Amino acid sequence: MNPNDIITINTTFKVEAKELSSFEWELRQVVNVIDFKHVSNTEKLYSSDDTFKKLVKAKKEATKQCELYINKHNKK
């Protein structure tokens, strides 16, 4: 990677609901925002629902396999 390359990153923040609008506005002033979405709190669901746990595990594995595939086949 060269210092002047444009890269895409994905990160997750926690912010107070009352600050959300101004936070998004400030973020959009300094970077090119591709996606901005609210992440639901799934702690209770994860701790009480076995089907949801299986779905989360399957999603994690699918994401891992996708990243491995990209890294293997997306070389410059």
Image (cartoon, rainbow, N blue to C red):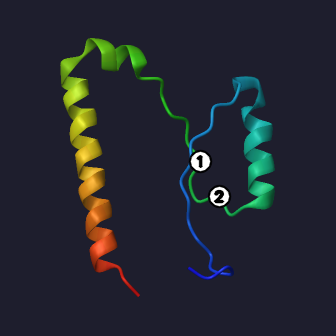
Residue 37 position in % (x across, y down)? 55, 42
Do callouts 2 and 1 mark residues in contact (Cβ within 8 Å)? yes
Residue identified by numbered label 2: 33
**Residue density around tag 2, few if under 14, some if 14–19, many if 20 or more, within 10 Å:** few
**Viewer-closest of 12 and 38:** 12
**Viewer-closest of 1 and 31:** 1
Q: How many marks?
A: 2
Q: At 56% from the left edge and 48% from the top edge, which residue is drawn?
A: 11
In the figure, 32 relative to 58: above or below?
Answer: below
> Looking at the figure, which quarter contains the N terminus?
bottom right
Q: Kindly identify the amino acid type of the residue bearing the numbered disc 2.
A: Val
Q: At 72% from the left edge and 61% from the top edge, which residue is drawn?
A: 31
Q: Kindly identify the amino acid type of the residue bearing the numbered disc 1.
A: Phe
Residue identified by numbered label 1: 36
Q: At 74% from the left edge and 55% from the top edge, which residue is drawn?
A: 28
Residue 14 position in % (x across, y down)? 63, 31
SS class of the residue under badge 2? loop
